[in-house]
Image: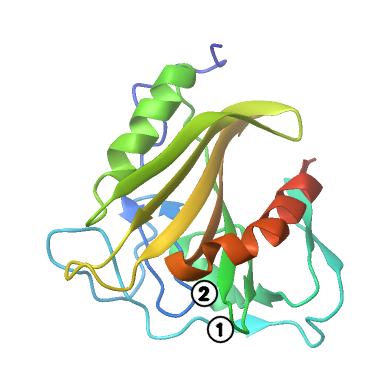
């Protein structure tokens, strides 16, 4: 499959990857979206001081809608605070604040890959920069009928502690690349897959 605009890299600014304490989530961003955080030497992992959420009644299922897409927030999840989204350049995000904690974030980039091979290879190149990175699986996927690539992987800090498992679906729609990222502590990941599947199943482009 080839995309409409040819680029040498899937995303020009994919090098900014964030690891947030507590909710532990990675998000791809442009180089001009640098948060005020401390970077772990030798990696692109950073540790912001706070993962804030908002939403007066996280017990309710509601639809989160922005300009380019919409999706359902399950009961037990809350919408992430705008300052947290802004710090990473995420277009939208929700978090499960109570144990077992998890996050879902979406980032959008105007760069697109040449084809599925470029999408896969470019994304894996960036993911492998995480310390103690381990690829669990990668496969073709579809999000709202749009083809892309899905990666499940784990990583930890430079001391091989605080292990995180994430899955990310990378798809192209209307000449933009969308990164849909789920994240959880590795020990809690299997407990979250039902919610992850429900959120992804509710995701629709506009």
Q: Helix, strand, or loop for circle 2?
A: helix
Residue bearing the label numbered 2: 84
Q: Earlier in the sequence, mark 1 or mark 2?
A: 1
The N terminus, quarter of image? top right
Q: Is residue 151 above or below residue 52?
A: above
Is any part of residue 26 visible from this angle? no
Q: Position of residue 22 (x, y in %)?
A: 45, 80
How many numbered discs sit on the rendered protein?
2
- Is residue 44 left or right of 73 when viewed as pictured? left
| Residue displayed at 82% across by 85% down | 57
Q: Nearer the viewer, residue 169 or 133?
A: 133
Q: Which mark is residue 121?
A: none
Q: Position of residue 50 (x, y in %)?
A: 45, 85
Q: Nearer the viewer, residue 183 or 146?
A: 183
Q: Which mark is residue 52?
A: 1
Q: Position of residue 112 (x, y in %)?
A: 49, 28
**Mark 1 touches mark 2? (CB < 8 Å):** yes
Tell me the quarter of the picture where residue 46 sits: bottom left
């Amino acid at each position: 499959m080839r995309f409409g605009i040819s680029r040498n890299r899937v995303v020009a600014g994919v090098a900014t990857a964030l690891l947030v304490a507590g909710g532990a989530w990675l998000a791809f961003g442009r180089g001009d979206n640098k948060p005020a955080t401390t970077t772990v030497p030798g990696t692109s992992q950073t540790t912001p001081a706070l993962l804030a959420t908002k939403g007066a009644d996280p017990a309710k299922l509601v639809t989160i809608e922005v300009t380019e897409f919409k999706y359902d927030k399950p009961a037990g999840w809350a919408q992430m605070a705008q300052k947290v989204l802004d710090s990473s350049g995420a277009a939208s995000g929700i978090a499960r604040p109570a144990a077992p904690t998890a996050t879902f974030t979406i980032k959008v980039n105007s760069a697109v890959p040449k084809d599925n091979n470029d999408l896969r290879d470019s994304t894996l190149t960036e993911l492998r920069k995480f310390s103690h990175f381990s690829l669990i699986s990668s496969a073709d996927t579809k999000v709202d009928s749009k083809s892309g690539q899905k990666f499940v992987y784990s990583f930890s800090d430079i001391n091989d502690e605080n292990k995180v498992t994430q899955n990310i679906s990378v798809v192209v729609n209307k000449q933009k690349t969308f990164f849909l990222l789920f994240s959880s502590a590795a020990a809690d990941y299997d407990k979250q897959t039902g919610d992850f599947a429900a959120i992804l199943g509710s995701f629709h482009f506009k």
